[in-house]
Image (cartoon, grey):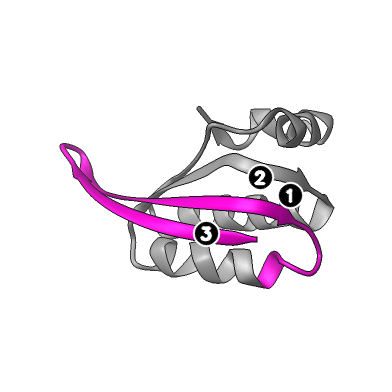
Amino acid sequence: MTYKVQDEVLPHGNVTTVYLDGEIDMDKTEEAKEAIFPHIDAGKEVHLNLSQVQYMDSSGISVLIESHQKAIEKGTKMIVKDVSKSVLKVIMMAKLEQILNLE
């Protein structure tokens, strides 16, 4: 898994987009958290772009849930964007479309 980060200033505040690429499985969850959590901790709205994630297992799903919960605790939000079809299937099977902010 690789990632890149892009900061933007939008009319409603600072937004950080984290673009994840590759597979998010048990071996990559810590790396994914290291890419996402500092921005949430800084109080930024985080957009998580998953268009280039080909595979995500249950540990990757737990990263999404933890990030979502952390954002709520910090008074900000995390939006999951441009989800690849394979990852969207996993999210739907876990019924997380009702919990996560998907765009």
Q: Which residue is mark 1?
A: 61
Image coords of residue 8 (percent x, y) = 24, 48
Image coords of residue 39 (percent x, y) = 40, 63
Q: Is residue 82 left or right of residue 56?
A: left
**Does label 3 or label 1 sit earlier along the sequence?**
3
Q: Which residue is mark 2?
A: 53
- Hey, what amino acid is under mark 1? Ile
> SS for tag 2?
strand
Bounds of the magenta span?
Answer: 1-30
- Hey, what amino acid is under mark 3? Tyr
Q: Is residue 39 left or right of residue 69?
A: left
Q: Answer yes or no: do the residues labelled 2 and 1 have beta carbons within 8 Å?
A: no
**Does label 3 or label 2 sit earlier along the sequence?**
3
Task: Report the quarter where the N terminus lies.
Answer: bottom right
- Hey, what amino acid is under mark 2? Val
> SS for tag 3?
strand
